[in-house]
Image (cartoon, rainbow, N blue to C red):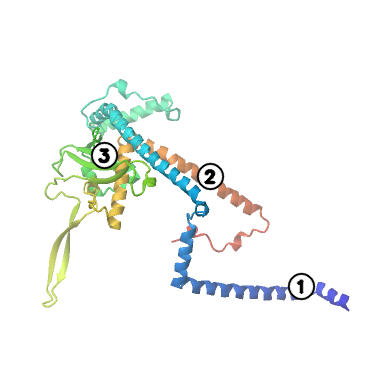
């Protein structure tokens, strides 16, 4: 009889088996639904969320607990190592001070070259044929026929246009080619920056607190009376006594701009708006004119002031952080390599790494697609929900 029962079970009708599977799936679906409901209820409870967040915060970067388990005599030796680390930080600070002195020394060697660059840009000096000779890279080499054709085209353009002086819009083009700077530019800034002739970096004198000044030289223009606009960044290269282990080289502590002597009606950092106001009692309407701040690159010369307490609101902190990044970038990259940012070559070099990463990502995607095609169980039609990046907005 038992054998008959076993036989009945093994020879169960396939339709009956499907019913069993459907029942199991329904039960599993109900369990999953209850679990989701319970999870939703928990996530809507502020106390549970706070406890969960506190637990997660404790897990991130939490020490292993080994230090706390050490004997007192070993902890004492660890303190000795920390004191050595503080001394290392002070030596590192001296190292950066000497680096600053080297920067001052070599800035004096670079400056004659930068001055000549400025003279060429503003047409104060016309370079010789020898100075203009440039051997192109192998990729840039042209056939004789192409060279002749390019020469003819250039001659035609020269005949059509007046002979330009120097290199027009040199610094404006540099700014527009660099994302970090172009984000600051507004359309009304561009006519002014066409008059920018040079940017120089001046380091603080020996024995003076560490700092550097960016000097923007303008030709006479219809917008402001200044010929030079300046921005000075004060730096510190010493460990903070309250937190010496955070020292990681010189840091910018603050900056000061300058006053721009705008010609009347030309101040692009301000704009005039008109508002209509209705009288509560009489119901009459009047138009009020107000002057409000306006987005402009020239706000760069009016940074937020850092109070003596050093405490700033979040907006001011964000503005200063971006300001420090821009000032450092102009000093380290733009001024030394301006011509390469003008031609775009420096930008292409910066982008090379990103292109390689993109190619690697493409390869990985290709491998995944190949795996899916080779998978006998893969059915594209079942992928009804495309990933978020593929959905139309």
Quadrant in the picture for residue 393: bottom left
Q: Are there few (<14), some (14-19), or many (20+) residues within 10 Å of tag 3?
A: some
Q: Nearer the viewer, mark 3 or mark 2?
A: 3
Quarter of the figure that contains the N terminus: bottom right
Q: Earlier in the sequence, mark 1 or mark 2?
A: 1
Which residue in the structure is indicated by mark 1? 14
**Where is residue 104 shown, x and y percent of the image?**
28, 31
Indicate which disc residue 211 carries: 3
Is residue 275 shown to the viewer in this render? Answer: yes
Which residue in the structure is indicated by mark 2? 360
Q: Earlier in the sequence, mark 3 or mark 1?
A: 1
**Is 227 drawn above or below residue 295 in the view shown?**
above
Q: Are there few (<14), some (14-19), or many (20+) residues within 10 Å of tag 2?
A: few
> CA gap, disc 3 to disc 1?
84 Å
> CA gap, disc 1 to disc 2?
49 Å
Helix, strand, or loop for circle 2? helix
Q: Residue at x 31, y 34 (%)?
A: 100
Helix, strand, or loop for circle 3? strand
**Is 109 drawn above or below residue 68 in the view shown?**
above
Helix, strand, or loop for circle 1? helix
Q: Nearer the viewer, residue 108 or 384?
A: 108
Q: Residue at x 60, y 62 (%)?
A: 381
Query: Relative to residue 73, is residue 161 drawn left or right?
Result: left
Quadrant in the picture for residue 95: top left
Is residue 181 shown to the viewer in this render? Answer: no
């Amino acid at each position: 009889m038992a054998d008959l029962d076993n036989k009945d079970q093994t020879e169960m009708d396939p339709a009956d088996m499907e019913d069993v599977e459907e029942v199991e799936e329904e039960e599993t679906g109900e369990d999953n639904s209850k679990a989701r409901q319970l999870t939703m209820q928990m996530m809507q409870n502020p106390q549970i969320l706070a406890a969960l967040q506190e637990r997660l915060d404790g897990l991130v970067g939490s020490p292993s607990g080994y230090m706390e388990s050490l004997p007192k005599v070993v902890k004492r030796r660890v303190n000795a190592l920390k004191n050595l680390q503080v001394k290392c930080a002070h030596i590192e600070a001296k190292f950066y001070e000497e680096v600053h002195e080297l920067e001052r020394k070599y800035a004096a060697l670079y400056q004659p070259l930068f001055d000549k660059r400025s003279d060429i840009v503003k047409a104060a000096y016309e370079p010789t044929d020898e100075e203009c000779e440039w051997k192109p890279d192998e990729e840039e080499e042209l056939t004789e026929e192409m060279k002749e054709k390019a020469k003819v085209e250039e001659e035609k353009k020269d005949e059509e246009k007046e002979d330009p002086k120097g290199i027009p819009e040199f610094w404006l083009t540099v700014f527009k080619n660099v994302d970090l700077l172009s984000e600051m530019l507004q359309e009304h800034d561009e006519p002014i920056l066409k008059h920018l002739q040079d940017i120089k970096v001046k380091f603080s004198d020996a024995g003076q607190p560490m700092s550097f000044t960016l000097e923007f030289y303008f030709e006479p223009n219809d917008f402001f009376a200044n010929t030079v606009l300046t921005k000075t960044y004060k730096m510190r290269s010493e460990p903070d006594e309250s937190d010496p282990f955070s020292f990681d080289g010189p840091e910018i502590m603050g900056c000061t701009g300058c006053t721009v002597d705008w010609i009347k009606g030309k101040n692009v950092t301000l704009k005039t708006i008109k508002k209509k106001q209705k009288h509560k009692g009489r119901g009459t309407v009047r138009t009020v004119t107000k002057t409000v701040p306006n987005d402009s690159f020239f706000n760069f010369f009016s940074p937020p002031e850092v109070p003596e307490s050093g405490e700033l609101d979040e907006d001011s902190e964000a503005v200063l952080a971006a300001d420090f990044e821009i000032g450092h970038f102009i000093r380290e990259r733009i001024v030394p390599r301006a011509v390469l940012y003008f031609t775009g070559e420096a930008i292409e070099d910066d982008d090379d790494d990103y292109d390689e990463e993109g190619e690697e990502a493409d390869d990985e995607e290709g491998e995944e697609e190949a795996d899916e095609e080779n998978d006998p169980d893969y059915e594209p039609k079942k992928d009804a929900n495309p990933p978020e990046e593929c959905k139309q907005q």
